[in-house]
Amino acid sequence: MVRITRIIKDVPGVSDILFAGDNVKVEAGTPSAMVRLRGDWTIESAENIDAQMAKTVAVCGSGAVIDCSGIAQLDTTGAVLIRRYAASIEASGAALLTGVGADHKVLLEVISSCPPPAPTEPDSVAWYLSPFLQVGTATILGLRSSGRLLSFLGLILIRLFGAFLDPSRIRLVPMVHQMEVVGMRSMGIVGLIAFLIGAVTVNQGAIQLAKFGADIFVIDMLGIGHLRELGILLTAIIVAGRSGSAFTAQIGSMVLNEEVDAMKTLGMDPVDVLVLPRLLALVICLPLLGFYADIVGIAGGAVMAWIQLDITPANFLVYFREVITIEHYWVGIIKAPFFAAIIATAGCYNGLRVEGSADSLGGRTTRAVVQSIFMVIALDALFAIFFTNVGL
Amino acid sequence: MAIRVRGLKTAFGAHVVHDGLDLDVKRGEILGVVGGSGTGKSVLLRAIVGLLNPVEGMIEIAGRDKAEMSGEEDRLSRRDWGVLFQDGALFTSLTVAQNVQVPLREHFHMSQDLMDDLALSKITMAGLPIDAAVKFPSDLSGGMRKRAALARSLALDPSILFLDEPTAGLDPIGASAFDQLVLELSRSLGLTVFLVTHDLDTLARVCDRVAVLGDKKILINAPLDEVRKFDHSWVQEYFGGPRARAAGIGKG
């Protein structure tokens, strides 16, 4: 603590100037140097003062008398600077503050009663340890979150089963609203992408197959590829990016706003109110979207076949009906409800797990999309093996 | 004159909040703004700090018309005021100390060491314990968050401080300490304070003058004693109620 007095100890006689800057002048004196502060000590000149005072401390040696009578304007930043450098001068001897004007005194007293510096950032580990820490944390978090996701899935299934026994618990209005948002309104983007992918499949396939003189088989390729895999997989990925992330963001910001806690105290179950309508809406809409993507994708292929291979749409359809059986369609579309469940579960789970900060909301949204796309593709691979083994 | 508002009209669509509102805030004074819910206290604050564009009217801060300032001037003039939002509005992904340093980092190029020192000083000035500096806003209680937000609004040593319901949600001890803090700061730093509040104790203890919002205008802007005698049903009810008596400003 620096003492504050109003006694001005002027050293008589001519003094040597040890250092002079815009805001400070240091004069040699006995027994200690005289540091005269001058000009405005405000936040505007803080960077300047900081640099000047670093030099001042260096020339002061063992202690100094700090004369504040020359200060024109002082604000809290200036006061902090005075306390800071008085303390560092005192560290090498003694520092005495003099000539403090009455109006500045209050300010200096407020500031000089501040405790010494403490860290302003959370503790961090040494750089060479941090990779291990990250791996360890990520592993534990990964295991924990898989466990939690699984238990969340269980919770949803229990609530869902309960809702089938007591259908009045299903909230129809939010469900229909969600169906419009996740189903109806994504038809544009799903249709566009399915159409383009269908067209590209035919375009590229025809070029390769033409080398074997087998370009008519591009229709087989389109039909099987699009109906079994591409149509529904693309739809699921688009919906995961579009609606899965929206679920997380909506529910997450409600969590941050304590709306979810409010629901609990009002006797509403967040799973019933927030999760089930979204889950059911997606389970209903994704197969429909998948069917729509199938049709549009094949239409895209047909258009490309007409342009590139001169196969008229009528001929295309005749050939298509001959080679593509309905099983291919069922193999594709049966996967849709499972994908929907994955997307909705991952989205809602991550939304409910948001805590604290805007960062957490962003991180959770990313995680929801990554998790759901990964799980959709992994499940798709399992389905592919399964259907091959049962001979479909 | 620190703030001068003339003929202010604000509206949300067809809903007019203020119409022909005039207000003066003198340099170095603490002005308390009161009014019933929905009279547009916060809207007035938002209009003055420029978060909301008024339909018409003139707002002058420190003698400069906001409408005539260029974008850069406007940005620089913002260094000169601090705003404390009702819920603090701290950046949730930063610690309290980092929150306080945000404006310093944005406007100046100080050494990290000095910024740490400044941040800690402001944090203690705002009455927070020093270990709160490394905490995230989500780990703080409502009252502490408010103090942290005050520390941030003081970071640039503003000459005008806008406080939106600073004592709402604080316990009486905390609220009275907050009042004392505002009073001390305004005296020692010569701060002009624009204070929106419902807290009658704050009005009685801290405010030099009280402005009452009602009927889309400022009904009266005067020291508390005069406001109390003002002949308007809402003002009479407000300052004549049991809570006002408890705060020692009622007539009874």
Image: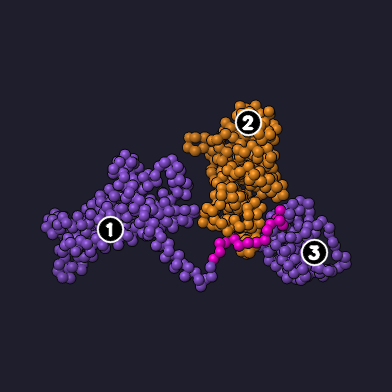
Chain colours: A purple, B orange
Q: Report the Cα–Cα distance between label 1 and label 2.
A: 68 Å
Total tally of numbered discs in the picture: 3
Give how far apart the Cα atoms at labels 2 and 3 are. Answer: 56 Å
Q: Chain of mark 3?
A: A
The amino acid pointed to by label 2 is Pro
Residue B10 picture location, percent across and down: 54, 38
Question: Identity of the amino acid at label 3?
Answer: Val
The residue to which callout 3 is attached is: A65
- Asked if badges 1 and 2 are on one and the same chain, I answer no
Q: Quadrant of the N terminus of chain A?
A: bottom right
- The amino acid type found where label 1 is placed reads Leu
Q: Please tell me whether mark 3 sits on a helix, a strand or a loop.
A: strand
Circle 2 residues within 10 Å: few <14, some 14–19, many ≥20: few
Give coordinates of residue B16: x percent, y percent.
Answer: 52, 35
Q: Which residue is mark 1?
A: A233
Report in which chain the residue with disc 1 lies.
A
Residue mark closest to the camera, 1 vs 2: 2
| Residue that badge 2 annotates | B242
